[in-house]
Amino acid sequence: QVQLVESGGDLVQAGGSLRLACVASGEISCISAMGWHRQGPGKERKLVARITSGGSTTYYADSVKGRFTISRDNAKNTLYLQMNSLAPEDTADYYCNAILYDVCAAATGKPDYWGQGTQVTVSS
C-alpha cells in the first residue's frame, strides 16, 4: 500500500503564493507518475499537474500554465506544487495522486492512490 499526506493549504489573498507538499510512504518503489488534482465547490475533481517518475516530463492544465510548478524530490518521497499568482478561481481542495507501475497495480488491484486533500482558499 501507499500512503499520501498533503500539507500546505491555507487562506491567501489573490496574487499570493503557496507551496503544497505531499509525502509518500509505504510501497514507494511502486509509484510511477504523481500528480495534483483539485476539486472546487460544486465542481468535478480535475487534474492540475502531473510529473513522471524521474521528474523529466510534466503536464499542466491550461488554467495553471505559467503560474504553477510541479516537482518531486524522490530522495524525500515528496511531491510539491508551487502555486504563484493565485486567483479566487484556484480555490479548491487539492489532492495528491500516485500512479502505480503496472506490475504493482496488478498485484494490489489498485491503479493509484489518493491523499486526503488540503484546502486552498484564495480571497479577492
Image (cartoon, rainbow, N blue to C red):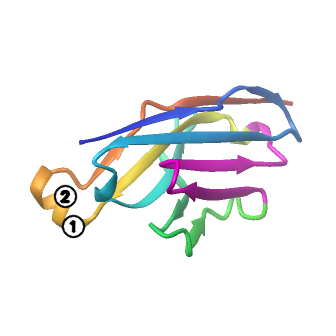
Work out whether residue 30 or residue 93 is closer to the camera in this orientation and state it. Answer: 30
Residue 98 location (% of width, % of height): 38, 52
Residue occupying image coordinates x 49% and y 40%: 23
Q: Tell me if 123 is positioned left or right of 117 in this view.
A: right
Which residue in the protein does label 2 denote? 105
Which residue in the protein does label 1 denote? 102
**Residue 114 got which mark?**
none
Work out whether residue 92 or residue 106 is closer to the camera in this orientation and state it. Answer: 106
Please check the rendered image and state whether residue 78 is part of the magenta-colored stretch, yes or no: yes
> Is 95 drawn above or below residue 29 in the view shown?
above
Please check the rendered image and state whether residue 91 is part of the magenta-colored stretch, yes or no: no
Q: Tell me if 26 is positioned left or right of 22 in this view.
A: left
Q: Tell me if 14 is positioned left or right of 61 in this view.
A: right
The region drawn magenta spans 67-88
Q: How far is disc 1 from disc 2 in space, using C-alphas? A: 5 Å
Q: Is residue 44 visible?
A: no
User: Which quadrant of the figure has residue 26?
Assistant: top left
Looking at the image, do the residues carrying marks 1 and 2 touch, with CB atoms under 8 Å apart? Answer: yes
Residue occupying image coordinates x 47% and y 49%: 77
Residue occupying image coordinates x 84% and y 48%: 85
